[in-house]
Each structure stands twice: as C-alpha cells, then as structure tokens.
Image: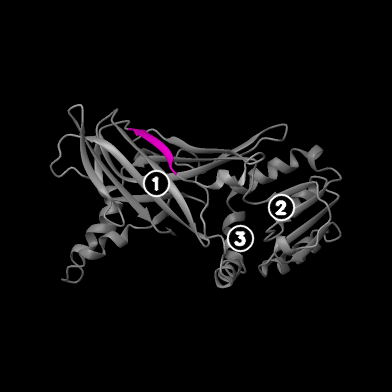
C-alpha cells in the first residue's frame, strides 16, 4: 500500500508477541460467524481438499489446519512465528492429528516447504470488498470531543483534534447509518495483482437516507469463499450480526448536516506505515451558505468553499493516523 514495506524487527516482534497469549485467539474462535465461515468453506467442499497438500500460513491455534485434515487433506504444513504454535502442536496431538500436520515455527518466507496444492490463511478468502457509509453518532462524539472543554476546570480544547484523529473500532446500531452504503473496493484475490493493493484515491458518493447529521464515516469489509459448491459470504458491516472485527469509525471534527437525497462525495486513500495504515478522507457536499458551513477536519486537513452554477460547496479532508480499539 505504501512505499514503506520494510517493517522494523521491533515492530514485527511486537506484533508476533501479541499473538502469544490465548485471549486474542479465544476472541477469534468464539466469533462463530468468522470461524464457521472457514469451517463451512472447507468441510462442505471435501472434493477440494481430498488428498491435497495444504499450507496454513499463520496457523495460530492450528484450527484451520485441523479443519483441513477433517476435510480430507493428505498433509498440512502449518507455519507461525508466535509461541502459540507450541500449543497448536499439543492441540493437534490430543485430536489425533499430529501425524497429519507439520508445525514449523518460522516466517512462511523462511520455511522450507514442498510444493503445496492449497494455501489457507485466516485473512485470505478468495473475494473481498471494502464499504463505507455516513453515520449519526452525536452522543458518542460529544463524549470524545466536548469533554476537553473543561477538564477539572481547565480548558483542554487544543486536545480535541487528537481525540478523534484515529479510527475507532465500534459496532454502531444499524439505525445510526443515515446514508446509503457504498463499495469503494472490490477485489478478486485469485487474480489480484500487487498494484491492486495500492489503495489510492478510491471515490465514493454517500446519499442521505433522511434529514440528519453525519458525525463520522463508518468502514467495514465483506469477504467470500466462492470456489466451493456453496459459496460462503460474510459481512462485517452494521446490517449483519456483529463479528470480532467490528467496524471502524472515523469521526469528523465538525459534523455535516444533510438533507434526504443530498450527496456527500469524495475519496478515501490508504498509506501503509510499517504495520499500521494512515487513512485520509477528502470530501465535498453542497452547502446552504458559505458562512460557517465549512465542515472540515482540522487535524492535518484542508478545507475550502466554492461556488458552481450558483450552488455553494463546502469541502474538507482528514488524516487518521491509526486504528484504536
């Protein structure tokens, strides 16, 4: 996604260490929507796995390796760098699958592997798409922003931009969505090229479903396994049962009042910084006047007001430096 793909050893070590303990894996495994989508995609399609050599990248608890064995795989090679792989070996043993799974504690790039027929990875189905919408979230946003007006009798308002300069993982109620959702990226991962992952200038148009105020952009992804007899589709969005992935909320510094049918247009881009993403939204909408209507993010943002054929348009942009839980 970006130019900086040389992750530091320290950043790598921190990421891998975060997967050493059980709690993060417990959360993922207990997410039945997520886990059953992988289970169904594999066990409902034994013809794809029968007598095949499988590579499981980032095996974690080894659960996908074991699903592959149950689906008929001849042998599975499972790689991981975190210490959880030591527990995965024990889990395979108690499930009488240790003779079918070879666990290799290393990066997949450094593993000595035979030719494999199938690659499984908990983050790679064969199709995925990215979606955004505008949401009303005034109460939550007020708690994040207005709090800084009076902190034990002190004015901390300069902290406001930093308070909302990150994306926040949330599961807002679907009733908070006040615009039509739009798909900004649709990838077939079977044919995608490296250049397709350069997520620059993805356009969007969000039309309001009702008169209301947009306090934030909401982003989520959907994914599909389509190679089997029965496609498996999962949405992590606000109109589907919640998953451990949740959605990501990007607050605007100044909310945008919208009328039903009014459109907010713009583009979103992503830039990789080590293992994080910087996300930038640039947007424009028709405004009733040029006086005090310029709804723009002040954190590393730009703004402007222009007139076109007698109509006034306000614009803004915001840079979100990382995702926060």
Q: Earlier in the sequence, mark 1 or mark 3?
A: 3
Q: Residues within 10 Å of mark 3 (few under 14, many from 20)?
A: some
Q: Disc 3 to disc 2, how far (Cα)?
A: 12 Å
Q: Position of residue 242 (x, y in %)?
A: 49, 46
* Highlighted magenta segment, given as a residue range: 201-207
Q: Disc 1 to disc 3, how far (Cα)?
A: 24 Å
- Residue at figure coordinates x 67%, y 61% from the top left: 60
Residue nearest the viewer, comparing 68 with 6: 6
Q: Is residue 15 left or right of residue 322?
A: right
Q: Earlier in the sequence, mark 3 or mark 2?
A: 3
Q: Position of residue 107 (x, y in %)?
A: 70, 64
Q: Disc 1 to disc 2, how far (Cα)?
A: 30 Å
Q: Which corner quadrant holds the C terminus?
A: bottom left
The tag on residue 25 is 3
The residue positioned farthest toward the front in the image shown? 3
Say which residue label 2 marks: 64
The tag on residue 172 is 1
Label 2 element class: helix
Label 3 element class: helix
- Residue at figure coordinates x 55%, y 69% from the top left: 11
The residue positioned farthest toward the left in the image shown? 291
Q: Is residue 45 left or right of residue 139?
A: right
Q: Residues within 10 Å of mark 1 (few under 14, many from 20)?
A: many
Q: Earlier in the sequence, mark 1 or mark 2?
A: 2
Residue nearest the viewer, comparing 83 with 40: 83
Coloration of the structure image:
one colour
- Residue at figure coordinates x 61%, y 60% from the top left: 25
Q: In which quadrant of the rendered view does residue 266 lie?
A: top left
């Amino acid at each position: 996604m970006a130019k900086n793909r040389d992750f530091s050893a320290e950043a790598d070590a921190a990421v891998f260490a975060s997967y050493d303990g059980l709690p993060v894996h417990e959360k993922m495994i207990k997410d039945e929507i997520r886990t059953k989508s992988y289970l169904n995609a594999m066990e409902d399609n034994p013809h794809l796995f029968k007598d095949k050599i499988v590579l499981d990248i980032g095996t974690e608890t080894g659960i996908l390796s074991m699903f592959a064995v149950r689906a008929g795989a001849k042998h599975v090679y499972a790689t991981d760098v975190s210490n959880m792989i030591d527990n995965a070996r024990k889990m395979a043993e108690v499930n009488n699958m240790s003779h079918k799974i070879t666990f290799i504690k290393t990066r997949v790039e450094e593993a000595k592997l035979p030719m494999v027929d199938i690659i499984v990875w908990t983050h790679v189905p064969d199709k995925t798409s990215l979606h955004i919408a505008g949401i009303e979230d005034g109460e939550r946003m007020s708690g994040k922003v207005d709090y800084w007006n009076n902190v034990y009798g002190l004015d901390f308002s300069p902290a406001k931009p930093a308070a909302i300069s990150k994306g926040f993982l949330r599961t807002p109620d679907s009733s908070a969505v006040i615009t039509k959702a739009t798909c900004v990226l649709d990838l077939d991962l079977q044919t995608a090229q490296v250049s397709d992952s350069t997520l620059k200038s993805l356009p969007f148009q969000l039309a309001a479903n009702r008169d209301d105020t947009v306090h934030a952009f909401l982003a989520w992804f959907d994914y599909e396994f389509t190679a089997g007899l029965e496609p498996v589709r999962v949405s992590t969005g606000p109109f589907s049962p919640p998953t451990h992935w949740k959605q990501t909320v990007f607050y605007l510094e100044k909310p945008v009042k919208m009328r039903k049918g009014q459109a907010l247009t713009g583009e979103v881009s992503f830039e990789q910084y080590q293992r994080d993403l910087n996300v930038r939204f640039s947007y424009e909408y028709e405004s009733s006047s040029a006086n005090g209507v310029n709804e723009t993010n002040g954190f590393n943002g730009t703004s402007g007001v222009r007139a076109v054929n007698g109509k006034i348009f306000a614009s803004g942009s915001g840079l979100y430096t990382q995702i926060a839980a």
